[in-house]
Image (spheres, grey):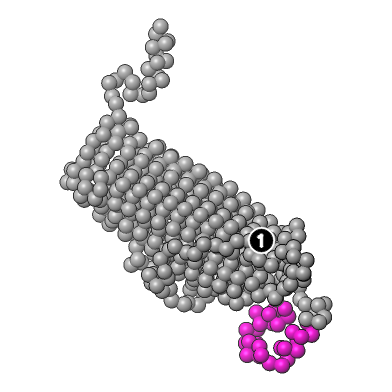
Amino acid sequence: MRALFVAGIAALGPNAGTGARAAEQRVEPGESLQALVDAARPGDTIRLAAGRHAGPVRVDRTIALVGEAGAVLAGTGVGSVLTIAADDVRVEGIEITGSGRDLPAMDSAVLVTRQAKRALVRGNRLVGNLFGVYLHGAAGSMVEGNEIVGRSDLRLSEAGNGVSIWNAPGAQVIGNTIRGGRDGIFVKTSRDNVFAGNTFTQLRFAIHYMYTHDSRIVGNRSRGNHVGWAIMYSDRLEIRDNVSDDDRDHGLLLNSTNRSEIVGNVVRNGREKCVFVYNATRNDLRDNWFEGCPIGIHFTAGSDGNTMTGNAFVANRVQVKYVGTRFIDWAHDGRGNYWSDNPAFDLDGDGIADRPYRPNDVMDEVLWTLPAAKALLNSPAVQMVRWAQARFPALYPGGVFDSAPLMRPPRVPPPTSLPAPSSRPAFPRSSPGGKRG
C-alpha cells in the first residue's frame, strides 16, 4: 500500500502532497516584479497590469509572464531587460524596451540563456532594444507572433538583430514582423530550425544563415532590405515559398550552400541580382520566379552539380551571368526553364521550345571582363561578332544553355502585399567594399 501511495504522489507532480497549486498573481506598476518572480513557484503565472514596470528582471524558474493591454517592461539602458534561465518559461503580451547596447554582452529585450530550454516568447512588442530576442543555446524555444522594432540610431556594425540564434537546435521563429536594426534573423552553428511566415523590412539581411543544417525557411517576406535571404555554409535546407521584393543587393544569396531545395520562391525588382550562387553545389533550384533585376542569376566560383528546372526568368536586363568555361545544361528530365526574352516557336505544341536557349555569347563575356567595352556595344564590329556566332555555334564560349526551354512559366506569383518601397528610408549606394556596413 505504501508503494502505491508513493507512486500516486509522484504521478501528481512535485507539488503534490504539499497543498501547493499553480497560482496567478497580478503585479501593479511600482511594485517589485523581481521580488514576485523570486517568490513564485514553478507553474505560476505573473500578470503585469497596464503601465510601466521596472526592469531588468531575471527569471530562474518555470513560470509565465503575461502582460495585460498596455503593460510595459522597461530596462535602464544597461544589460538585457528580461533574462530567462529556466526551462519552459512563457513571455506573452508585453511591450519590452530599454536594453543596453553592448554587443558582446548580447544586450536584448529577451535573452534566453543556455540554461533554458523550450522558452516561448509570443505576442510581445519589442521596441528600441539592441537585440530583440537572443536564443543563446536555448534548444527547442519558439519566438512567435512578435513585433520587433530595432534601433535606427546606430550604424549597421553597431546594431543588433531582431532574433539571434546560437546553437539552439529545434528553435522556431514563426509569424513575426521585424524591422530596423542589422539582420532580421541571424542564426549561427545550429540545426533543425524553422523560420516561417515572418515579414522583414528596413534591414541588412532579412535572414542570415551561417553553419546551420537540416532546417527550413518557408513562407517569409522581405522588402526593401539589402539582401533577402543570405544563406552561407549550410547544408540540407528547405527554402520554399519565400518572397523578396525590392531588396537592394540580392534577393537570394547561396554561398557554400549544398544539397538544399530552393523551390517556389519569388524574387522581384532587386537592384543588383535576383540570385547570386557562389561555390554552392548539388542544390535543386526548381519552380522559382526571378523578375526585374539587372542580373537574373549570377553563377560563379565552382558552383557545380545544381539542378535548374521550371524556373521563370522574366524581364531581367541580363538573364544569366555565368563565370566559368564549361557547358552547363539547365534542363532536367526534358524540362528546362522559362526565359521571357526567348523568341521561340513550339511547332509540335508540347510546351517546349523547338530550339535550345542560350542566354550569353562571346560579347557578354568580353563585357563582364572589360566593362569599358560597353562603349562599343552598338559598333559594327560587335554586331559582326554576334552575327558570325549565330551562324557558327562552335564559336560560342562555354557557359549555360537550356536544351528544353519552356514556352510558358509554370506559375505567376501573386502581387506583393507589403508596404511600398517609398515607406522606408532609401539606402545610399556605396562602393563594393562598403555594402555590408
Q: Residue at x 31, y 18 (%)?
A: 17
Say which of 416 and 425 sits in front: 416
Quarter of the image where the N terminus is located:
top left
Q: Position of residue 18 (x, y in %)?
A: 29, 20
The x and y percentages for residue 141 are 44, 43
Instruction: Decide if residue 193 is in sight here.
Output: yes
Query: Which residue appears at 74% of the width and 84% of the height?
Result: 386
Going 78% across and 81% down the picture, which residue do you hit? 390
Residue 290: quarter of image: bottom right
Label 1 sits on a secondary structure element that is loop
Within the image, what quadrant is residue 158 found in?
bottom left
The vertical placement of 419 against 431, above or below, is above
Locate the C terminus and report the quarter of the image it occupies. Answer: bottom left
The kind of secondary structure the magenta stretch mainly shows is helix
In the image, the segment drawn in magenta is 361-389
Q: Residues within 10 Å of mark 1 (few under 14, many from 20)?
A: many
Query: Can see residue 181?
Result: no
Residue that lies at the very extreme toward the top in this rendered image: 1
Residue that numbered label 1 is attached to: 310
Could you tell me which residue is drawn at 41 percent across and 48 percent down? 144
Q: Is residue 250 above or below residue 360?
A: above
> Relative to residue 338, is residue 246 drawn left or right?
left
Q: Position of residue 286 (x, y in %)?
A: 64, 58
Amino acid residing under circle 1: Gly
Q: Position of residue 53 (x, y in %)?
A: 22, 48
Does the magenta run of residues contain 363?
A: yes
